[in-house]
Amino acid sequence: MRILIVEDDPLLGPGLQTGLRQDGYTADWVRDAEAAEHALQLEHFDLMVLDLGLPGRDGLVLLRDLRRDGCCLPVLILTARDAVADRVSGLDAGGDDYLVKPFDLDELSARIRALTRRRYGPSTAVLRVGNLELDTVHRRVTVDQRSLWVSPKEYALLEALMRNADGAVSRAKLRSTAYGWEEDVESNALDVHIHNLRRKLGKHRIVTVRGVGYRLVSEPGK
Ligand code: CA
């Protein structure tokens, strides 16, 4: 899961980034609307956390512009404005949810999970593919109900593969899901993580799709 944080506050921006990373998300931080648009053109994001009070173009205007252009990325609005009118205009402009500052990071995480569930279908917080389960609340992976330790990067990759089980997921998508901009990604890092996941899940579970990327098989051997 990759999240774009749009927040001009020099303390809150990095704070959110650190917090979300500790929660296992890939998180990138930009400070204004232009940088946000640029980021969205360059990369695939799964969700945006958007402050309304931005320098230059307001967050609300950015959100309207994005929706007008057909962008359907889930957007969680952050606002210091504790006025009902501001929250209403945020939701009317295309926001999916909002949080009023100051807020608790745990609540932000819970709302992000709720938005993700709404967007990606399953009404539960647990993804299931064959005998494989991924609990997005506790960030736990189990195989046949036995828990399996995976690193944060492996978790991010596995989640992306499970959300598109039995379909090919491109290397670019996987890389973008698991790594933010400042992270130094070695060219073979993705393959190393996939190799480790295969070692843990069984080598037939993740199939290489030539020229594309990888595919998670729901029932290997069938
Ligand atoms: Ca602000």
Image (spheres, rainbow, N blue to C red):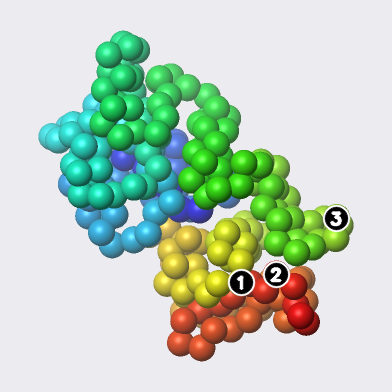
Numbered label tally = 3
**Which amino acid does the dot numbered 3 rest on?**
Gln
Mark 1 residue CB less than 8 A from any atom of ligand 1: no
Q: Quadrant of the C terminus?
A: bottom right
Residue at 46 percent across and 74 percent down: it is 170
Is 102 rendered above or below residue 37? Answer: above
Q: Is residue 10 visible?
A: no
Q: Dot 3 lies on which element?
A: loop
Question: Residue most toward the left?
Answer: 56
Mark 2 crowdedness (10 Å alpha carbons): few <14, some 14-19, many ≥20: some
Residue on which the image places disc 3:
145
Residue at 61 percent across and 47 percent down: it is 122
Residue at 36 percent across and 28 percent down: it is 78
Q: Is residue 156 left or right of residue 80?
A: right
Mark 1 crowdedness (10 Å alpha carbons): few <14, some 14-19, many ≥20: some
Mark 2 residue CB less than 8 A from any atom of ligand 1: no
Q: Is residue 110 left or right of residue 195?
A: left
Residue on which the image places disc 2:
218
